[in-house]
Amino acid sequence: MGASHARALVTEPAGWDAAVATAVDTSGGLDVLVNDAGIVNYGPAGAYTHDAWARIMAINLTGVFNGITAATEALEVSGKGGSIINVSSTTGLIACENVPGYVAST
């Protein structure tokens, strides 16, 4: 078995379903999921628009949820236990100026 990748919008569950199906079809199963998508929008909290905030949360948080949801069954079926790796940022642990959406979502 080898590694595979698929390009998808992490905010779209259908894209995740297609990516998992590609991994299963090309590799015979799924052993690991790495959630590593994230965006940042610079500026003070008062300057953020609702749309900018919603986009950050959709990619940085909902994208992770969508990946986990799409991959769980395939990971369980593999019979190997499977692993989910959610990559985060240290900005969630320290004070970083002018990136409140990113800090809140990491």
Image (cartoon, rainbow, N blue to C red):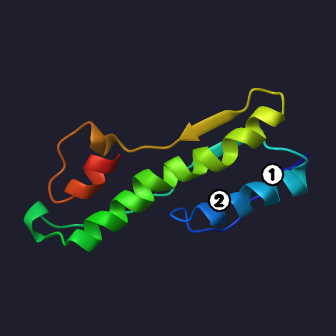
Q: Residue at x 88, y 50 (%)?
A: 27
Front-most of residues 56 and 14: 14
Is residue 41 visible to us here?
no
Q: Whole-percent x and y of residue 101?
A: 25, 57
3D distance between C-alphas at marks 1 and 2: 16 Å
Residue type of the residue flagged with mark 1: Ala
Q: Whole-percent x and y of residue 51?
A: 27, 73
Residue 81 sits in quarter: top right
Q: Earlier in the sequence, mark 1 or mark 2?
A: 1
The quadrant of the image that shows the N terminus is: top right
Circles 1 and 2 in contact, beta carbons < 8 Å: no
Is residue 12 visible to us here?
yes
Residue 17 sits in quarter: bottom right
| Residue identifier under label 1 | 3
Mark closer to the observer (1, 2): 2
Q: Residues within 10 Å of mark 2 (few under 14, many from 20)?
A: many
Q: Dot 1 lies on which element?
A: loop
Q: Residue at x 67, y 33 (%)?
A: 83
Front-most of residues 4 and 105: 105
Name the residue furthest left. Answer: 46
Q: Whole-percent x and y of residue 47?
A: 11, 70
Compared with 102, 15 (above or below) is below
